[in-house]
Image (tube, grey):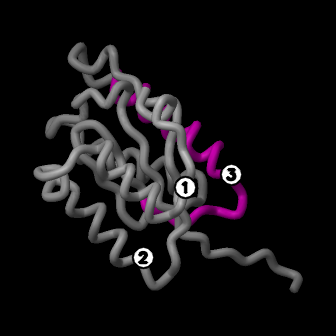
Amino acid sequence: MPQSLTRIYLHIVFSTKHREATIDDTIKDDLHSYIGALCRERDCQPVEIGGYTDHVHILCILSRKITVMKLLEDIKKYSSRWIKSKGDDYAAFYWQDGYAAFSVGYTEVQKVADYIRDQEKHHAVQSYQTECRKLLKKYDVDYDEKYFWE
């Protein structure tokens, strides 16, 4: 095949440093839009971006031209700078060092997008840690609790 063709859906989750509730309604929508723009600039088409006060979910189509690690490095670096530029209330903003990323089958894309869109509802009854543990279990990812919750 003379072409390189891919369609890899990726569900990415990462939190603020120490899960501090610093993503407030003042910046939330603009942050999600900014992250979407960062994805598009890297040829990773965003499907849905959402989250809660202490974390972000990204569902995107991963470009064949970038690694997951480089995509996340860029998103975190540039969005952190952007947030800090929004005023003194955000001057101490940081993302956690790590992230979780899961492949999503085509038939599950709408379900994951709906899940991301309903973050406010999910977090009325469960914490980010509970949500992450469920995702890690669903995708059968081994992890060490002592390093996961920085």
Q: Is residue 40 above or below residue 14?
A: below
Mark 1: secondary structure? loop
Q: Residue at x 22, y 56 (%)?
A: 119
The disc placed on residue 141 is 1
Position in image of residue 60 (x %, y %): 48, 63
- Residue assigned mark 2: 109
Circle nearer the N terminus (3, 2):
3
**Element under label 2?**
helix
- Against 128, residue 4 (above or below) is below
Q: Is residue 69 one of those drawn in magenta?
A: yes
Q: Amino acid at mark 3?
A: Thr
Residue 18 appears in the picture as rendered: yes
Question: Which amino acid, by three-letter code, is at mark 2?
Answer: Val
Residue with the mark numbered 3: 67
Q: Quadrant of residue 94?
A: top left
Q: Earlier in the sequence, mark 2 or mark 1?
A: 2
Which region shows up in magenta?
Answer: 59-84
What residue do we see at 24% from left, 13% from top?
88
In magenta segment, residue 72: yes
